[in-house]
Amino acid sequence: MKNNLPQLEEQYLKYTKDIQEWLPEGVIDININILHNLNLLNYHMSDKKSHSLTRYFQVIESFEKITLINEQFVIWIVPEKINDTPITYVLIALNAEQQLQLEIAFSTWGIYNSSRLVLRVLEKFLHEIQETEELLVSLK
């Protein structure tokens, strides 16, 4: 699908219309347990093994969301406010030739809703998705 913006928007609307259809496990709510499982709580340990957000993305901003696009991924970062509580939703899809493949979605709110933490969790998930894809390719 690469950088076809109208198709990307169509996919985004399709995914958000019925997220449970595309991700039966639902949206991951980032909390202390998730951060622990991702090894993001121990600053010194995670800093040494960190995969800094060094990927190059085309950034498209709209009033509703920020879309990040590169050869591997399409990421939608969507800020919302529910009952006066700011929430950030992040959807990550693999950017395949013919169509996108939604891989994971997560949300942050409260003390977990800082830009630095959102980016660290995003980078961790991107790294895990990339490792899984590389493993799948090597098994073929």
Image (cartoon, helix red, strand yellow):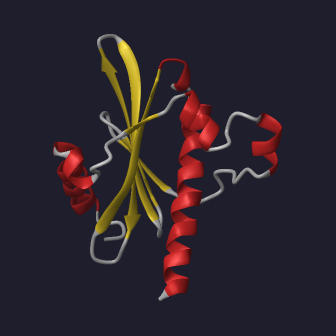
Q: Is residue 117 visible?
A: yes
Q: Position of residue 128 (x, y in %)?
A: 56, 59
Q: Nearer the viewer, residue 131 or 33?
A: 33
Q: Position of residue 129 (x, y in %)?
A: 51, 62
Quadrant in which residue 135 is drawn: bottom right
Residue name at image x 60 percent, y 59 percent? 55
Q: Nearer the viewer, residue 134 or 60?
A: 134
Residue name at image x 77 percent, y 35 percent? 43
For the view shown, which residue lies furthest in the top direction?
Answer: 84
User: In the image, 118: left or right of 18?
Assistant: right
Residue name at image x 68 percent, y 42 percent? 39
What is the tally of numbered marks visible in this picture?
0
Residue name at image x 47 percent, y 64 percent? 70
Task: Work out whether 136 lies above or below 22.
Answer: below
User: In the image, 28: left or right of 35?
Assistant: left
Q: Is residue 91 visible?
A: no
For the view shown, which residue lies furthest in the bottom direction?
Answer: 140
Q: Position of residue 3 (x, y in %)?
A: 35, 66
User: In the image, 65: left or right of 73?
Assistant: left
Q: Position of residue 56 (x, y in %)?
A: 57, 60
Quadrant where the image shows the N terminus: bottom left
